[in-house]
Image: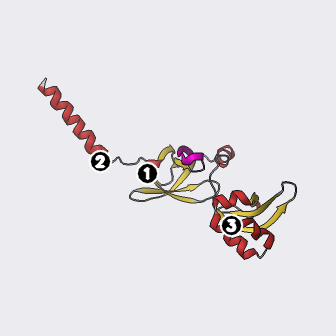
Amino acid sequence: MHKKVQDEKERRRVQDVAAHKGSIANIDVGDFVLWSRIDQRLPDNKLLGQWVGPFKVIEAKPHSFVIQHLISGREYDVHASRLKFYADSELNQTAELLELVSRQGMVLGVEEFRNHRFNDALDRWELQVSWMGLQAIEDSWEPLDVLAQDVPVKVRDYINASGDDDLRAQLE
């Protein structure tokens, strides 16, 4: 009986040591990984982790990896605990795979606002958004009120620089 208790105690001690030291990530530069990304756009400040990807690992750091989005080319510095191995560097990047990645709803950053307009059909102000990591042909017209919630400082700076009094009135 004493031997069983001692063995169990030693097993738990070894597990505890391993848990504190962490485990070595089984990911190499060139591999493809899934990223557990937190979507902060949910109501009531709820956080939901989603596995998105695949992304290509382009750099290994001591405690994180730099991964690259296959469509936009945008790079992210991600802790190893947020990554899951997907495929090795021999993965064939087919058009179907790239289509899957493009439909995952990655949150894009606003690079700049290029123009503004009042959309009579929808009865709202819109800003033409240039997205980080995307080409100019992918610029889009987005509602001012949504952008004012998502990137308020950029919206305010653009409106103040625009010189359009009608647009400026929307800030108040």
Please give the residue where the numbered disc 2 appears in the rendered image: 20
Q: How busy is the neighbourhood of tag 3: few (under 14 within 10 Å), some, or many (20 plus)?
A: many
108 displayed left or right of 121: left
How far from the left and from the top, in percent, is residue 56?
54, 53
Tell me the residue at 83%/63% (across/down).
118
Q: Which circle's residue, 3 or 2, is located before the other in the chain?
A: 2
Report, in whole angstroms, how far the alpha carbon at label 3 lies from the one at label 2: 45 Å
Q: Which circle's residue, 3 or 1, is located before the other in the chain?
A: 1
94 displayed left or right of 138: left
Q: Is residue 155 above or below residue 63?
A: below
Q: Is residue 77 above or below residue 3?
A: below
Magenta segment: 43-52
> Split into 4 quadrants, where in the image is the C terminus?
bottom right
Q: Do labels 3 and 2 touch, CB within 8 Å?
A: no
8 displayed left or right of 54: left
Q: Amino acid at mark 1?
A: Ala
Q: Is residue 12 magenta?
A: no
> Split into 4 quadrants, where in the image is the N terminus?
top left
- Foreground mark, 3 or 1, reads 3
Tell me the residue at 12%/26% (across/down).
2
Tell me the residue at 76%/63% (across/down).
128
How far from the left and from the top, in percent, is residue 90?
54, 47
Please give the residue where the numbered disc 3 appears in the rendered image: 155
Please give the residue where the numbered disc 1 appears in the rendered image: 80
**The residue tagged with tag 3: helix, strand or loop?**
helix
